[in-house]
Image: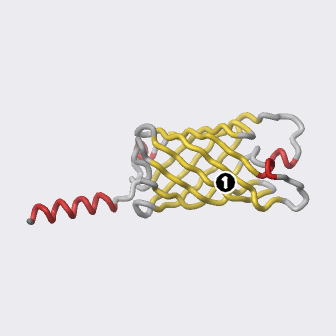
Amino acid sequence: MKKLVIVAFLICFYNINAQSFIGKFDSKFQVGANIQKNGTGLNLSYDYGLGQNISVGISSTYLLGINDLLDADFGDRFDLRARFNANLGSVLNVDERFDFYPGLSLGLKNFGAHLGLRYFFSDGFGLYSEFGFPIAKYKTTDLTIIEKLHNQSYFNIGASFNLE
């Protein structure tokens, strides 16, 4: 009986252990605010672990608040990106609840890069922040202010959820 109690305790302790990225088959959903010049909006992203330090995913942003002088339609406000991350939390070995992930993204507006941080307070909930910027824009000359939306540096901040 004593061994059964100890095993049950260890299983419970293991399940409460908050980890930011566990590797293959890991599944994260993030929702947060997107902040960029002339606009703010909602960012949703999903990352799926392919290996110990590699994940792929999708990210979408819709700008809700934009400069009143801009006449932006849905296509100007919306962006969708496929993303690739190198999850380096276990390599840096700061804390198992912390993850640092540089990555690349291919979107409707450009090819870009991002640097992100995640910190989990429990097994299922954490916070994230992410800074991104374009590397190559599809249209490079004479961009209007509206065309610069999603085609410039941005900052995301919000909540991260473990979907396992």
Picture coordinates of residue 7 (x, y %)? 17, 59
Picture coordinates of residue 124 (x, y %)? 44, 60
Neighbourhood count class around disc 1 (C-alpha, 10 Å): few under 14, some 14–19, many 20 upward:
many
Q: Most extreme residue toward the front, as rendered?
A: 74
Q: Most extreme residue toward the left, as rendered?
A: 1
Relative to 92, residue 14 above or below:
below
Picture coordinates of residue 109 (x, y %)? 75, 40
| Residue in view at x 49 percent, y 61 percent | 126
In the image, is 16 to the left or to the right of 155?
left
Is 93 or 101 nearer to us in this picture?
A: 101
Quadrant in the picture for the N terminus: bottom left
Is 100 or 42 nearer to us in this picture?
A: 42
Circle 1: residue type: Phe
Corner quadrant of residue 6:
bottom left
Badge 1 is on which residue? 155
Circle 1: element type:
strand
Picture coordinates of residue 24 (x, y %)? 41, 41
Query: How was this image coloured?
Result: secondary structure
| Residue in view at x 76 percent, y 44 percent | 151
